[in-house]
Amino acid sequence: MFGLPLSRPRRTTALTAAIGLTAAFAALWTSLGPAQSAHAAALPAPDHVVVVVFENHAYNQVIGSSSAPYINSLATGGANLTQSFGVTHPSQPNYMQLFSGSHQGVTDDSCYTPGFSSAPNLASELLAAGKTWGSYNETLPSQGSTTCSSGKYARKHNPWFAFSNVPTSTAKTMAQFPTDYTTLPKVSFVVPNLCSDMHDCSVGTGDTWLKTNLKAYADWAKTHNSLLVVTFDEDNRLAGNKIPTVLYGQPVTPGSSSATTYNHYDMLRTLEGLAGLTAHAGNAATAHDITGIWAS
């Protein structure tokens, strides 16, 4: 009923095969499991991440400047990346690289056809994983508007409109930024207009705008497992593209800094990891997580 016992040679062959299969699975786990676990262990898991992108200023124009007291207070109470860099010039390619790990063929600031690319990006990855995404765009004429420009609004600073796999409805106005921060998406970008982002107006103007619009969130993030990232697209073309980048919130060790060299691809990879994503868009796949600043 149960079959005849295996002969010694057949038992030996079966045992050898079983050992080989076990070794193969062990090797597969060694090659995949620890690498994924190490990546997850290196980064915290904040409930919300808000990224604010400013314009065209070098690190030493902002960090340590009396014109930017609020940003410097975030650096003091959070983490300051002292070797953070844009990837290229001018503005628009940098936004694409920060959002999707590639400039997607966009090498200038001209107005492209909306939804021309279906390449993976931070938003499409979040949505595919069942997580939430949104952007808040100052002076955007209306939610989802794909206009190239309107007053002080410039679409060249809003890369999500380039992608057919990102619903335009996720692009909201700054007036729609919630006061109940628990309703924020898992990851969101906030893009000031051409004055508030320091492009047309002063560092002091941008610093005041940040304090007025994001201080309440930053204070909340400090006690609600959330994160504020303040960075720039590029420098003033006079500092090797070295830009200010500050991270602030409960997951960050207060007063920490990192002299490791990072760029937009590293930031994208880190944002993906903070959101618990295993996919990495474009050049983020070969970039590095930001480390050395996270609270234990």
Image (tube, rainbow, N blue to C red):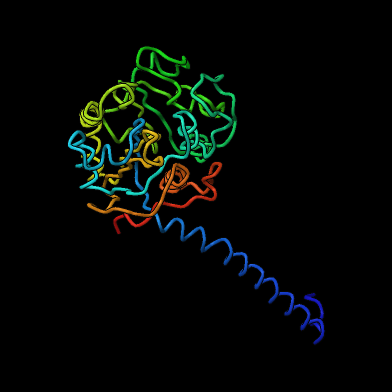
Residue drawn at 37 percent across, 49 percent down? 45
Work out whether residue 66 or residue 255 is closer to the camera in this orientation and state it: 66
Res 188 visible: no
Asked if 268 appears above or below 2 in the picture, the reply is above
Instruction: Residue 291: name its quadrant.
Output: bottom left
Residue drawn at 40 percent across, 51 percent down? 261
Instruction: Residue 196: name its quadrant.
Output: top left
Q: Is residue 8 left or right of residue 201?
A: right
Q: Is residue 248 left or right of residue 142?
A: left
Asked if 73 appears above or below 256 in the picture, the reply is above
The image quadrant where one finds the N terminus is: bottom right
Instruction: Residue 53: name its quadrant.
Output: top left
Question: Residue 137, position in %: x, y?
Answer: 37, 23
The furthest residue to the front: 238
Res 31 visible: yes
Work out whether residue 294 or residue 34 is closer to the camera in this orientation and state it: 294
Work out whether residue 56 or residue 212 is closer to the camera in this orientation and state it: 56
Asked if 73 appears above or below 288 in the picture, the reply is above
Work out whether residue 251 or residue 194 is closer to the camera in this orientation and state it: 194
Question: Residue 173, position in %: x, y?
Answer: 36, 20
Question: Residue 57, position in %: x, y?
Answer: 33, 34
Numbered circles on residues, count: 0
Residue drawn at 43 percent across, 52 percent down? 289
The image quadrant where one finds the C terminus is: bottom left
Residue drawn at 34 percent across, 21 percent down? 194
